[in-house]
Every structure is written in structure tokens, then in C-alpha cells.
């Protein structure tokens, strides 16, 4: 099963859409393609704003690919896989263009990290979120800085320890993960289009400078996220995690 990453540009707005048949989950090749797409859009002088979305009517993003997690056979492979999420988050952080997230459905694990790394987010009321990593023997180590930065350490801790509990879209908005929520995707898209059209008309230099301000104090993530990837890469090799992943796959 292969996924896709497509970028379209219209009226200075680049829309990056990702898709994978397994609930928009991410194998490593897909993570690299998304990283590259974000960097290219950031470098494109014809782009002022980036919209990040996923395709389909199901989950926004199911996080890491279970198949690829089960295929990890050594520490280096484990660190390399989780570094894929580090690459995406750092690309979003370093991108000179503001990134607006369109979250139409559920987000789990690494998907929550991608949501948290957006600068502004529109979501539907169906967009429940969950950090399920502890339940499979690992933890949200790579994405934690992005999540904690957005919702605070206390809320992040609550999400992490309640690893089987879905948080509602209302909870995510109250805690800052979502900026705005809507009853339907139609209402979401109308508001998103209006917002991005206005934003793309503003001074590009001002937008770039405010992006820098938004991400002040995160420069150490260039090292931190890869240190966290090594932790996850080690844990994914444990018997506990292997058994848990196999149980999840058979459900």
C-alpha cells in the first residue's frame, strides 16, 4: 500500500495533501515526501501561505505505520524511522511560511504532533485526538515538544497517560490544539478559504517575521527531536511493544 503527497498552488496558497490507504498513517517514505514538500513550498517565492490537509473522509492521520514499526530490527532502524517525524516537525518549524492545518477527522499519535506543529488550525467536531503511544509500549517522545508547546505540559501529560482515551474537538480547542472548530467540513472549508485568502494578501515579509516570533525558543529542537527519536527507536524493539503492535493489528 502506497501513499501520496500532492501540492497545488493557487493565489499564493500552497495546499499540501497527504494520503495513505491505512487511515492516512505514515511509513518512512511518506514522512520524507511530506518533509520535502513542506521545504519546497517554503522556498517557493510564489507561495505566501501553506495549507496542510489529508485526503478522504476518515481519519486525518493515524500516526506511524504499524507495519513499518513491526519491521524495525535494530536500534539504527528504529531511530531512523522516528527521525522521520522529527524531520517533518522541524521542517514545519523552520518553514518561513505560515502553515494552516485542516483537520477533518481523528488524529492519533504522530498525527497529533503534526497538528500541533501547524501555526493555525481548523477542525471539525469529529476531529477527536489521542496519544496512544504508551498503550503500545513506546511514548510520544518525538512529538512531545510540539504538543507541549501548543497545549502545555499538564494537558500533554493528561493525554499521554490516558493513552486509550479520545479527547474531543471541544477539548482540543479549549486547550489550544485547535484554533477553530466547525460542525461540518463544508463550514470548515468556507472559513478556511476566507482566512487563507485574507492571510495571503498580507505583507510576505511581515508574515515571515511573525513566523519567527511564533517559534522563538525552539532552536534546540534540531538536536532534541533526534535524541527523542533514539528513545522511541529503542523501545519499539521491546517484546512488550512487538506484542502490543501485533494485538492492535489483529483487532
Image (cartoon, rainbow, N blue to C red):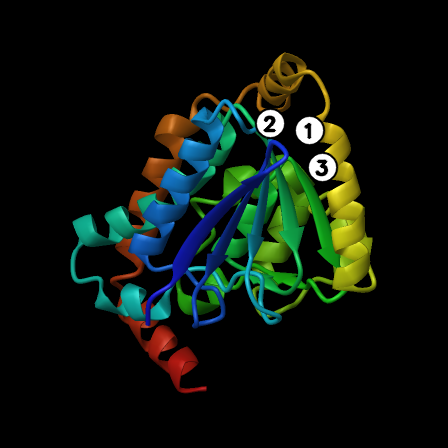
User: Separation of disc 2 and disc 3 at Cα?
Assistant: 9 Å
Which residue is labeled 1 in the image? 200
How packed is label 3: few (under 14 Cα within 10 Å), some, or many (20 or more)? Answer: some
Tell which of 193 and 182 is nearer to you: 193
Find residue 73 and report its horizontal and vertical position in percent.
17, 62
Looking at the image, how many numbered discs can be counted on the residues?
A: 3
Question: For residue 166, which quarter of the picture?
Answer: bottom right
> In terms of sequence position, does the residue under pointer 2 or pointer 3 come before the other?
2
Q: Secondary structure at mark 2?
A: loop
Q: Are the two marked residues, 3 and 1, in contact with CB atoms closer than 8 angstroms?
A: yes
Which residue is labeled 2 in the image? 48
Q: Are the two marked residues, 1 and 2, in contact with CB atoms closer than 8 angstroms?
A: yes
Which residue is labeled 3 in the image? 196
Question: For residue 146, which quarter of the picture?
Answer: top right
Find residue 27 and report its horizontal and vertical position in percent.
34, 60
Find residue 127 and report its horizontal and vertical position in percent.
69, 62
Task: State left or right for residue 163 relative to residue 136.
Answer: right
Tell which of 224 and 125 is nearer to you: 125
Q: Residue furthest bottom?
A: 250
- Identify whether 51 is placed above or below 66: above
Specify whether residue 106 is in view.
yes
Residue visible at 74% across and 44% down? 193
- Identify whether 217 is placed above or below 16: above
- Identify whether 223 is placed above or below 27: above
User: Separation of disc 1 and disc 2 at Cα?
Assistant: 6 Å
- Identify whether 7 is placed above or below 63: above
Q: Are the two marked residues, 2 and 3, in contact with CB atoms closer than 8 angstroms?
A: no
Q: Secondary structure at mark 1?
A: helix
Task: State left or right for residue 178 relative to residue 237.
Answer: right
Amino acid at each position: 500500500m502506497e501513499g501520496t503527497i500532492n501540492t497545488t498552488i493557487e493565489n499564493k496558497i500552497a495546499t499540501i495533501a497527504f494520503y495513505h490507504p491505512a487511515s492516512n498513517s505514515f511509513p518512512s517514505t511518506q514522512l520524507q515526501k511530506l518533509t520535502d514538500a513542506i521545504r519546497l513550498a517554503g522556498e517557493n517565492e510564489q507561495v505566501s501561505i501553506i495549507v496542510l490537509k489529508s485526503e478522504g473522509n476518515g481519519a486525518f492521520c493515524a500516526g506511524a505505520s504499524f507495519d513499518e514499526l513491526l519491521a524495525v530490527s535494530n536500534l539504527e532502524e528504529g531511530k531512523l524511522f522516528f527521525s522521520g517525524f522529527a524531520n517533518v516537525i522541524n521542517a514545519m518549524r523552520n518553514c518561513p511560511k505560515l502553515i494552516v492545518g485542516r483537520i477533518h477527522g481523528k488524529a492519533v499519535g504522530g498525527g497529533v504532533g503534526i497538528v500541533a506543529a501547524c501555526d493555525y488550525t481548523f477542525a471539525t467536531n469529529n476531529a477527536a485526538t489521542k496519544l496512544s503511544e504508551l498503550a503500545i509500549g513506546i511514548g510520544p517522545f518525538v512529538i512531545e515538544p510540539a504538543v507541549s508547546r501548543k497545549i502545555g505540559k499538564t494537558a500533554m501529560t493528561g493525554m499521554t497517560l490516558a493513552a486509550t482515551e479520545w479527547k474531543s474537538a471541544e477539548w482540543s480547542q479549549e486547550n489550544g490544539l485547535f484554533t477553530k472548530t466547525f460542525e461540518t467540513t463544508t463550514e470548515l472549508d468556507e472559513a478556511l478559504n476566507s482566512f487563507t485568502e485574507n492571510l495571503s494578501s498580507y505583507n510576505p515579509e511581515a508574515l515571515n517575521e511573525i513566523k519567527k516570533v511564533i517559534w522563538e525558543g525552539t532552536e534546540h529542537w534540531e538536536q532534541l527531536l533526534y535524541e527523542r527519536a533514539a528513545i522511541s527507536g529503542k523501545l519499539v524493539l521491546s517484546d512488550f511493544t512487538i506484542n502490543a503492535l501485533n494485538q492492535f493489528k489483529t483487532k
